[in-house]
Image (cartoon, helix red, strand yellow):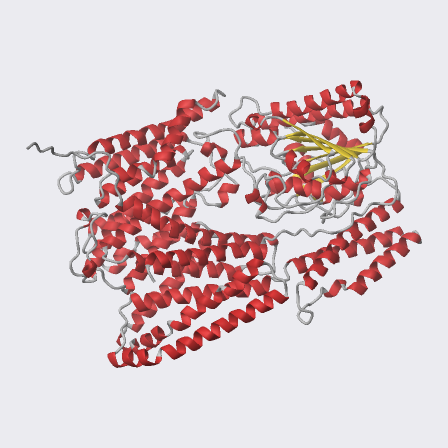
Amino acid sequence: MRMITFLLVGLIVHVVFFISIFDIYFTSPLVHGMTPQSIPLKAPASRLVLVVADGLRADSLFSLLPNGSSRSPYIRSVIENTGSWGVSHTRVPTESRPGHVALIAGFYEDVSAVAKGWKENPVEFDSVFNESRRTWCWGSPDILPMFAKGASGDHVYTHTYPAQEEDFASTDASRLDRWVFDQVKSFFQSVKSNSSLGASLLEDKNIFFLHLLGIDTNGHAHRPMSKEYKENIGLVDSGVADLVSTVEEFFGYDGKTVYVFTSDHGMTNWGSHGAGHPSETLTPLVVWGAGVQKAQRVNEVQPYADGYLQDWQLEHVRRVDVNQADIAALMASLIGVPFPVNSVGVLPLLYLNNSEEFKAESMYTNAIQILEQFKTKMSQKKETTLSFLFTPYQFLTESKQVEITNKARILIQLQKYEDAISLCQTLITRSLEGLVYYHKYDRFFLGCSVVMGFIGWTSYVVLVILKTHSGLSRPPDVVQKVRKTDTIPSRKLLTLCLCVALLIILFLLVQRSPLTYYIYCLLPVPVWYCVLKESGTLTDLVQSAHSLPLWKCLRYFVLVAFGIELLVVSFFHRSVLTIGLAALALWPFCSGLFSKAKWRSLSWFLGCLCLAAFPLMPVVGREPNVDVVMCAGLLILLTSFCYLWSSRHKTPLHTSDRPQFVAQMLHVAVCAYVPSLTHSSLLQKQGLPLMNQIISWSTLASSIVIPLLSSTRIFHRLLSILLSLTSTYFLLSTGSEAVFPPVLSWLMFAWINIEQEALLAQGVAGRQEVSSIDFAANIDISRIRQLKLDDIRRSYFFVFFIITAFFGTGNIASINSFDPASVYCFLTVFNPFIMGALMMWKVIIPFIIVMCTFETIQVSTQLSSRSLFLIVLVISDLMALHFFFMVQDYGSWLDIGTSISHYVIVMSMTIFLMLLSVLTHVLTSKRIILWRRTKIHFP
């Protein structure tokens, strides 16, 4: 199989493995076809006002100032006198879209919803807005449209400001909230001259939704501990007070309005959100008005051990915590609309101030609504599973459903409301557990299929390595015998695999399985066909075992196994990479290379130790320090100048290349200074300078093209790549991470040189001086050698450096929870997709530096590009398989999600490596010649 074909097949296989984890663990929990359930009694409220302060932390609202006063006096007075309060617990991902879906629709979107970002209803779902008579919304264009487009009919009205207003560099982000309050006030004033609108407002089951983005924007731009963030909370508090006054005055103080004040997610101290830190998952909930229990004074200790009550000085007022999805059920109960059919929220009865009958009927309706989802989910799964294979959820069989619902209804009729409520809560618990059971019903089956494919693919790659790159050979008599008898087993094997594939297809057809199930279940068949077809290679290995250094092989495999385990642990504890780098620093001393190349060994040793400091630094939470970016720029310039000066005799620059390197070095200096100018301009609230933006985007666009103009001599091309990529990296840096590429490049330079000494120690003949190698030169096939055991070590070093490049200063997770200041040189207006893409490119830049180094080592150590890459593929696949096995159905969802995210990261890196290998080859070996001198001959 040719390299390009193998690469394409490997890419397809890994894309399937990558997508499979989402089909197995991140499928949508929604089911359709249920009947909406309404409470049969009159609701206590006619209308509801929902205020969501985006990005507001619970402690920021509830904490008192040093002088004992509150920065939100109105909300504080509601908590202590007229309303009920608690902490709303959100779930990962703590982003705006999933948070608002949980609040308003009552269910938690799968984790992959963060990738959908702010799309308008990528899946259909019901919501409180949809069930209301009419809903009026004011706020962000990122949030409101998705609920308006998802509503049946035309009864959700949205009023948004332009998206350009969401600017992190704006002088005052709180103006977004001021705009919302002003619009609401103008709306109620306009009703006086619009009788039809006035009549609509006086009807029941209406909702008014205010989405306030100022706090979130100020938190991102200035951090939650900043003056701007805290002052914005005060502005929201006074705005809510005015809003209540306006609404009550309009409706004549009829006591039929209920108010809900909460947040979609919190925010870390460094101004990010998306993960599961308490500062992100704990949000405030304050409810008051019609049908709501007033503040309850308590003298005993409340059942919360988190210490927040004492910190907030609210231990004397009853606190009632809820899950975020419970708020949708609470709102539906208060205004008498049907519970959203997809809601999994449980009605928090302690917030209600109503009769026991109303509470019992509300809880019964809540239970029936969740049970309807369970029944629909069960029937769907039953229809797509063969009857003798179907295993129902034992704790809620059809007979038990009827028994519990009938008993609860009888208890309500007998006015035994507490018993009815308790029974309904039991039914809700079992229904939710049953929903999870059927949601995970096919996981084991699909997981086994993926594992079979994974093991088969890894086995095939190992066999390819042994067959084509290890020097194993069969005796001539064995070769002749195989040629005579090989066709029959091949035909039988092909027939067997086709029969297995046909049986799988028939089985999936009978079960009416989705198309993706066919891919996951059929993929192992051709993979294992290839493995069994190459089984003769194992026979060759066994026959050659007597001539192999078995103890040396065993030692290498034990070390590699330990090394893979070290890399797996580093995903959970970045500091393990520091231990690994410290161990790698000792390699020249343990292998005897130090005695042959002292200076190169010392350079390697110091480079490893310097790089080992980065995994100990925090990924997030750093304060911006643009002076470090300028220092990193000076470091790059100094090392570049020193190299060019020291190599002027051995590998002098061509006259045509000198202007380019001078221009690149000047460009690095400019790019290292631009973040300082941008930071200064934003501090003075003067916005992003246009010239800085032009420089940044032009640098990004040219970063891949510029190196193609340079010489293809190894170190000249590598230096051009480094200067080009670090220019972009500096523009995306805010502090110490800017030093990472120079230090990484230093170590990579030392690695290239010391591998030459290692090659010499192995006795490889015909070694060429590294500095004289040209990437574009034709490869002498006769000099390409077979793999040796030491090449496993080279491949492991590469994987280790790739992981270090990934976790050195940041990772893919930080795209979801990152400091927006990193992209301020490019844009300041909120755009999650462009910002995420820029952060992704920042993560990839160190990848490319390591990939180019590995390409150089392959060329300089006389190996084909395919051989080492295959070993790398095996190591990365073993890591991914390790994480796949770690995904168990026990422990917290956060633990399972962590293992899944690590699997996704490893698979992403493997796919990136395949794609970047092509890019790296182009970057190192191709050249664009803009001009060429020619001689003109005259006759």
Can you see residue 282?
Answer: no
* 679 relative to 851, above or below: above
Residue 276 picture location, percent across and down = 58, 45
Q: Disc count in the image?
A: 0
Residue displayed at 72% across by 20% down: 186
Residue at the spot 38% in from the left edge and 34% down from the top edge: 700
Residue at the left extreme? Answer: 939
Relative depth, front residue between 601 and 697: 697
Relative placement, left or right, of 488 versus 48 is left
User: Considering only vertical position in the picture, is 283 above or below 251?
Assistant: below
Q: Where does the image place residue 408, in percent across and percent down from the top left?
A: 86, 56
Residue 753 horizontal/vertical position (percent): 23, 50
Quarter containing the C terminus: top left
Q: Nearer the viewer, residue 927 or 895?
A: 927
Determine whether, in the image, residue 311 is placed left or right of residue 839: right
| Figure check: 276 above or below 502 | above
Instruction: Judge whether 193 appears above or below 546 on screen.
Output: above
Quadrant where the image shows the N terminus: bottom left
Q: Is residue 644 visible?
A: yes
Q: Residue furthest right?
A: 414
Q: Quadrant of residue 14?
A: bottom left
Q: Is residue 752 left or right of residue 811?
A: left
Residue 487 percent coordinates (x, y) = 37, 77
Quadrant assignment, res 674: top left
User: Which residue is found at the position 66% from the left and 63% from the top?
Assistant: 384
Farthest top residue in view: 193
Question: Which is more toward the observer, 475 or 427?
Answer: 475
